[in-house]
Amino acid sequence: MVAICSRSEGAINAAAEAINSNTQVAAAGGQAVPVVADVSREADIARFVGVALERWGRVDILVTNAGGPPSGPLASLTDGQWESAVQSLLLSAIRLSREVIPSMQARRWGRILHVASFAVKQPIPNLGLSNAVRMAVVGFAKTQAIELAPHNILVNTICPGPIATDRLVALTRQYAEREGVPFDAAEQRLWISQIPLGRLGEPVEFANLAVFLASERASFITGGTFQVDGGAVGGPF
């Protein structure tokens, strides 16, 4: 059973339909419940988590994930854009956690996965908002992992690299238009040329790590920051 949310009613309903029509999900008795909510808004977060608690009485696993902020050099960013990035990336993770932790503490079991970006280990040019605010999410997650460990609640951060998603397509298209180059050339220059495996990642490759960290097989792993990036991060950490 999973509750999922998005600002777009059409997008979240389509995602839930895709999950619920999967034969393996149906055979296991699974169900996805779509909720229209904006995680940059505190009231929407409370309402979203409330749907899950009302239906199932508890939350076992929380995955926090908000859309990336606008691109642009630091000098071009306004105070409003910085405040919006903090609301959507950092405060959403804090508020979602706050809503589900009591349920996890009551049963002494829980998993919290924060989705950040490989930019926290290797900053991406022209993505200053994401580079900076997602680092704050990692700091929050590390502190959270320490404080929640006595309650058997494990907290980890997943840092996807270039994964073939709509967000990556949008960033690539913006770059292509700005530089006046074809989309394929922009994709190669921006992403693929930086990846030792020589290709973009697939969403399922990200999901495989998330499923592992949410499982009992990861019962001694907390406070970690793991990239899924095809080797794109050059440093040792």
Image (cartoon, rainbow, N blue to C red):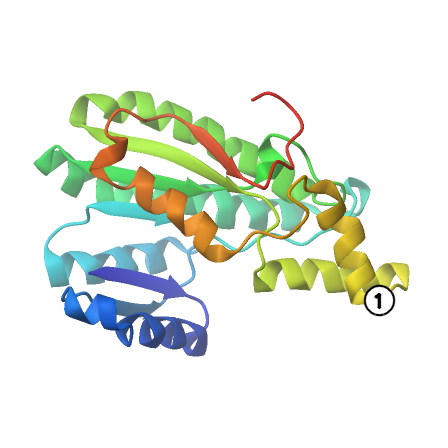
Q: Position of residue 9 (x, y in %)?
A: 41, 76
Point 14% across, 50% down: residue: 58
Residue 111 is left or right of residue 185, and the answer is left
Point 39% across, 77% down: residue: 14
User: Measured along the vertical axis of the image, is residue 104 above or below residue 33?
Assistant: above
Residue 125 is left or right of residue 86, and the answer is right
Residue 58 is left or right of residue 182, and the answer is left
At label 1, the amino acid type is Pro
Q: Residues within 10 Å of mark 1 (few under 14, many from 20)?
A: few
Point 16% across, 56% down: residue: 53
* Front residue (pair 210, 76): 210
Point 86% across, 61% down: residue: 178
Q: Quadrant of residue 112?
A: top left
Residue 181 is left or right of residue 51, and the answer is right
* Front residue (pair 55, 190): 190
Quarter of the image for the C terminus: give it.
top right
Q: Residue furthest right?
A: 180
Camera sees residue 176: yes
Give the residue at mark 1.
182
